[in-house]
Amino acid sequence: MKKLFTILTLLCCFTFATQAQSKSGTFGLQAETGYAFTLSDGYPEYNHEAFNIALSSGYHVTNKLFAGVGVALYDYRYSKLITNVYGSNDGPLEINSNFISIPIYAHGMWRFGRVGNPGLFVSLKAGYGIISKSMNPITGQGATDDVMYDYSGGLYLSPSLGYMYPINEKHAISLSVSYDHQDYSTTVKTNERNYKSDKTNSTLAVKVGWAF
C-alpha cells in the first residue's frame, strides 16, 4: 500500500511539473534585437548593414511549435567613398544610402529537445518590408546633384538557427544567427526620364531575444 501511494505521489508530482512547464495552447510574445552584417560590398550592387529589432506575437500550437505574426524595424545604412568610377576623371563619388524598412511578417518557430530544457530552435519569418523614402545617395564631383532616388519595399525573409535557454516557466532568452533577405526597388528620377531598378539586400544577422 505504501509503495502504491509513493508511486501515485511521484506520478502526480511529475504530472504537475510537466503541466507547469507546458505552454501548449497559450499565447506568447518574443522580442529580438541585433545587428545585420553585409554579405557583399560591390558597387553598384552594394548591400546595407542594419541595426534591427523585431516583436513577434503568436500562439503555442504545441510545446515545440510557436507561430503567429510580427513586425520589425531595420535601420539600413551604407557609406562608401569611390575614388575611381569606371575610369572617369570627374573625381570621387560619395555614397551615403540610409533607409528604414518595416517588415510585417508571419512566423513559425520549432524547438528541439524536452520541454523546459535549453535547446536549439529553427524559425522562419516571411512577409513584406515597407520602405518609403526619396533621396540622392550619390554626391561628389562626379555626381549629378538633381538626381533623386525613390525607394520602395518588397519581399522580406529571415530564416534563423538559434539556442533557447529558459529562465523560468514563463521566460527564456535566446541567441540566434539569421540570414535576412530584403527585396526593394529604386526609381531614379532625372530631368529626362525615370527608370526603375530591382535590388536585393542580403545580410547575416546576430540576434538576442527574450521570449514570454
Image (cartoon, rainbow, N blue to C red):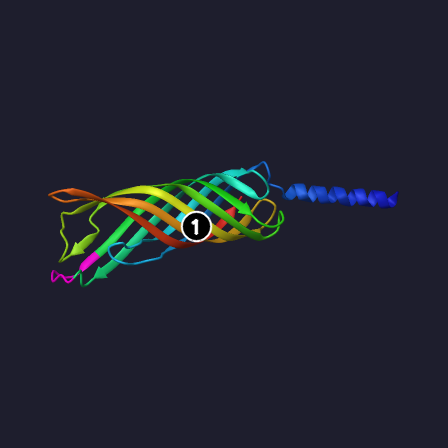
Residue 32 image point, x, y percent: 45, 48
In the rendered structure, which amino acid carries the disc numbered 1? Thr
Q: Nearer the viewer, residue 163 or 212?
A: 163
Q: Residue at x 17, y 42 (%)?
A: 194
Q: Residue at x 22, y 61 (%)?
A: 81
In the image: residue 118, left or right of residue 39:
right
Can you say whether 113 is above or below 91 in the image?
Answer: above
In the image: residue 139, left or right of residue 74:
left
Residue 46 image point, x, y percent: 28, 55
Residue matched to label 1: 33
In the image: residue 162, left or right of residue 97:
right
| Magenta highlight on residue 88 | yes
Secondary element at tag 1: strand
Give the number of callouts. 1
| Magenta highlight on residue 157 | no
Residue 154 image point, x, y percent: 33, 42
Residue 117 image point, x, y percent: 61, 51
Q: Nearer the viewer, residue 48 or 100?
A: 48
Q: Which quarter of the figure is the N terminus placed in?
A: top right
The residue segment tinted magenta is 87-94
Q: Residue at x 11, y 60 (%)?
A: 90
Question: Which quarter of the figure has residue 27?
Answer: top right
Dominant secondary-structure state across the stretch colored magenta: loop
Mark 1 surroundings within 10 Å by alpha-carbon count, few (fewer than 14), some (14 through 19), many (20 or more)? many
